[in-house]
Amino acid sequence: NLFKELNTKESDELNKKLAEEAVTVLKNENDFLPLKNIDSLKILEISFGVEEKIILVSSLAEHTYIEHFGISHTAKDSIVKELFAKVHDFDLVILQLNKATAKPENNYGIGNQTLKCIDSISKLKPSILALMTSPYVLNKFNSVSNFKSILCGYEFLPSLSNAVAAIISGDISSRGKLPVSTTYFKASTGIETRIFSQEEKKISKENFEKRKFGVIDSL
């Protein structure tokens, strides 16, 4: 079976390692990442482009309370209003941008609405921008000053989404460097984030389990 031959455990491990080396942190205001007290946060992940629930959410769900909201780049006004109504209920927002194109036309295929939504939400709540597409998309942003952190995963792939989640949660350190220059960041930009200690991870996990089961008990 060719599929099995190409997707071995060894190839999965290699993809994981390559992804962890590639993901780049471009901005990390006041060491915002990894998220401190992640177990006590209520996070909304908004996926602009891919509407179905994605691996970033399931990975972070092991550490914190997180909900997903998927929205297309051409969503109707009613969906946009629903999104903004939801944002207010959360402590922090992860703005994941995907389904862009290689060509700069129409803001690399994401249009104006997505850029406006991202900009507005970043002013409402502490926000992390996760680019699962070309870093050149940043050239279409009016500003990046409102984001607490910016990560670039370069492509919408499971291995890269997992790596982004692991950096946010402090399971791995970011080691990637930007291969090109953009309006806001020069080539070779890359901030190394810290990894939480085993003791910190243990305490966080215990606190999250207590919180999760406490919610269940209250129902």
Image (spheres, rainbow, N blue to C red):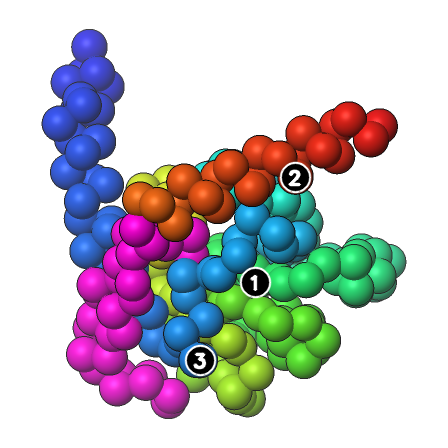
Q: Residues within 10 Å of mark 3 (few under 14, many from 20)?
A: few
Residue 136: say if magenta.
no
Residue type of the residue flagged with mark 3: Glu
Relative to 209, is 79 on the left or the right?
Answer: right
> Label 2 vs label 1: CA separation?
25 Å
Residue holding disc 1:
95
Residue stretch rendered in magenta on the structure: 168-197
Label 1 element class: strand
Q: Nearer the viewer, residue 18 or 182?
A: 18
Q: Position of residue 167 (x, y in %)?
A: 36, 56
Majority secondary structure in the magenta region: loop
Residue type of the residue flagged with mark 2: Arg
Label 2 element class: helix
Is residue 28 depicted above or below 85 in this figure?
Answer: below
Is residue 54 depicted above or below 30 in this figure?
Answer: above
**Residue under the point 57% across and 83% down:** 146
User: N-terminal of the two: label 2 or label 3?
Assistant: 3
Residue 101 in view here: no
Location of residue 13 (image quadrant): top left
Residue type of the residue flagged with mark 1: Leu
Label 3 element class: helix
Residue holding disc 3:
29
- Per the rendering, the mark at residue 211 is 2
